[in-house]
Image (cartoon, rainbow, N blue to C red):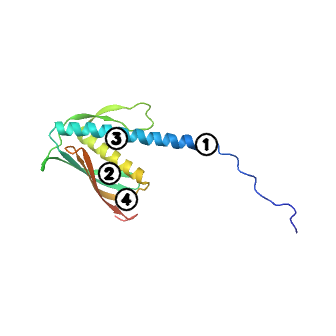
Amino acid sequence: MRQNEPRLMAPLPPASADFRAIHAGHASNEARIAALIAVNMALLYDHLMGAGITHVAASFICDDNTCLITGIAAFADATRVACPDMDIPYVDLDPDTPGDALHRLPLSDAITRLACDVLQDLRAASGTTPAADGSLSLDAAARANLLDYNPHPTGAR
């Protein structure tokens, strides 16, 4: 049998989603999260220095899309000290919250949440979510962070 007319698929209709708006919204959300992390970090540094703590080390384990803080150690110069029992302001990073929700958290909880925020932001920026463990040092004296991590092959642990 001979075919007299070609049988081509009908062209797809134009996309109904505005991808430029989606990308712009995503970029806006990323900028908002980066700004809020910077605000939370500055608040944390100020309160740590006010409490006499020069740096904090948070050890972590990350698997797939979750990061778990396994320990927190606070230091005054080279001396390990107890994390003071105080509340500090923290701005919630929830993208579904219409405004910036500022609430007070205990210092150890704020360190844990901020370390998770930083780790999740780094993992999102890299575009990968490799399993890893390591430590994140929040240096209040230098107002800088140091990440030391060991990536694991998928499924290895």
CA distance separating discs 4 and 2: 11 Å
In the image, 17: left or right of 127? right
What's the amino acid at mark 1?
A: Ala
* Mark in the foreground, 3 or 2: 3
Q: Which residue is mark 4?
A: 131
Helix, strand or loop at disc 2? strand
In the image, 103: left or right of 65? left
**Which residue is at the front of the view, 131 or 127?**
127
Of labels 3 and 1, earlier in sequence is: 1
What's the amino acid at mark 2?
A: Leu
Q: Which residue is mark 2?
A: 68
**Residue 49 drawn at (x, y percent):** 18, 39
Of labels 4 and 3, earlier in sequence is: 3
**What is the number of callouts on the image?**
4
**Residue 29 drawn at (x, y percent):** 45, 40
The residue positioned 35% from the left and 55% from the top of the image is 62
Find residue 16 and report its image quarter: top right
Q: Residue furthest bottom?
A: 1
Q: Which residue is mark 3?
A: 37
The residue positioned 26% from the left and 46% from the top of the image is 144
